[in-house]
Amino acid sequence: MNEVKDRGTIKVIPLTEASTPQFANSLSTSATAHVHEESSSLSSGGVDTDILSSPESSGSRSVWPSIFRVPNFCYDAELKLEHGRAAYSENGTLLTPDHKLRSNILEGLVQEIVRYKLYVTDKQFTNVGEALISKHPCLTERGSLTGYAGWKASLKNKLAIYRTQLRKLGCREVTVNSLKETPEGKPSAAFGIKKPKRSEVNYCPPYPIGETDVSLESLRVELLSDVKKRNNREVVRMKMEKTFAYRRYEVVRDTPMAQDFQTRWPALFDVNEINAEFKRITTMPLQSRFISQLDVLSDKLLKLFGKRGGQLGKRLQGILQNITQDDDVDVGRECVLKGLCVYLNEDPVNLVREFVAEDEAIFEGAIEETTVGIYVVKHDATSQPEDIGIILEGQQILRDLNNVALAAAMLFGLMYAMNLNYPPELKYTFEVLQKVVMELDGNTISKKTQALKNRLCE
């Protein structure tokens, strides 16, 4: 109930042009509502609602749009473009922009881009170029195969210059990559730019207005005692919200070990706070979306598993037998996750390891050897789990979780909260969870994951 308190849901119903006027006046939303538009055909099967953003959400940016919107430029630039459009529509004459017009267009596009991110991929630059000549065909470049190659190159250069200006102003998302900010003992920025790689919206946000390192550090120290008090969840939540940018900068800049970070921020290692942290980073709910989308895709995944032959098919059949023997929905979700690993030719033991309670020495040794994973402790091989938890870097990070699917969601959330790389032995499983299940950054995708996604769409 704490997760849904003071929250509501909204269903978005696409309307035809003929029916839009009839219902236009009947649709209204709250000013703080965050509407999640289901753009993928995979999600149309049953998830038609989403948790609304809370008023205290710290999202300073938005998710990169599927279709980039070219903004309106300054008044004189729009006048020149209007004349160019008229000439283009009359006789197909292309506009050769003068220096001022070109500069105004690039400046306007950069300001629109930074509403979403400061570090843009080549494919996203392509989206911007396509959107520009689609809205203003008169700006199509002569002699260019795409019609926007020059615009794309100029945009990359303009955004790089703009980041330099932001670095001088102290923008943390940019200064984290400067040599002066590199901590001792850490590789310099030249060895790898720290930037969003998994559709993080608030990758390294600025501090709240009026806050400094000193004031936020004092709040962190207060949290160490606040988290031990009973019935103090609301106070902890507010302070965690306020220190998000400070904590995030520490994660991105220092890349701390899991145990050290848990010592400094014990309040984060809780189911509710992992959900909240993931929402702050991506503006998307974690647990509700992960579980619901997994349920939506389960039937199609099970059919794919059943069609697989060979050795992988036999392994999948062994996993699917557990579903037929037990109608427990948690067992079904666990089997789907294990089957997904097998289908992607990865070992599910690397994701979920089961132990018998009596084998305490074996259990402790296995934890020390595990970098990333979920553990399940049972009294015997056939009994219900006594404990389910998460292991990071040889340490038990979370305990007493209700089921394996919840543990998988929390592990996925911790990957974002601590800015961790996916383990190599499970890279395709986590890629599918991110780009197919959670639908985060699904534009850049590996061939294996794309093949699975195509089969799910059949």
Image (cartoon, rainbow, N blue to C red):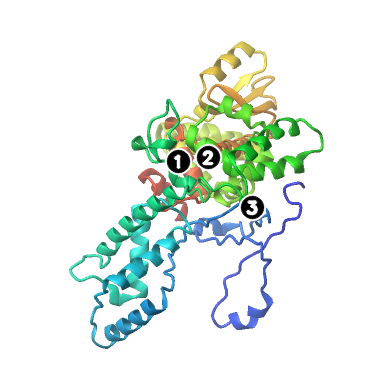
Judge left or right: residue 182 versus residue 261. Answer: left
Name the residue nearer the viewer: 94 or 449: 94
Q: Which residue lies furthest to the bottom in this view?
A: 90
Q: Is residue 15 above or below residue 219?
A: below
Residue drawn at the location 64% of the way across and 56% of the way down:
50
Residue designated by label 3: 57
**Is 434 situated left or right of 50 in this image?**
left
Residue furthest toward the top? 361
Q: Callout 3, which amino acid?
A: Ser
- Residue at horizontal 71 percent and vertical 34 percent from the top: 222
> Which residue is denoted by mark 1 in the rendering?
176
- Kindly identify which residue carries mark 2: 249
Q: Distance between the residues labelled 3 and 2?
A: 18 Å
Q: Disc 1 residue type?
A: Val
Find residue 49 and report its image quarter.
bottom right
Residue 369 shows up from this direction: yes
Assess whether mark 2 and mark 3 are in contact (beta carbons under 8 angstroms): no
56 vs 317, nearest the viewer = 56
Above or below 79: residue 221: above
- For label 1, the crowd category at 10 Å Cα-Cα, with few meaning under 14, some 14 to 19 and many 20 or more, is many
Question: Which circle, 1 or 3, is nearer the viewer?
Answer: 1
Mark 2 to mark 1: distance in Å?
8 Å
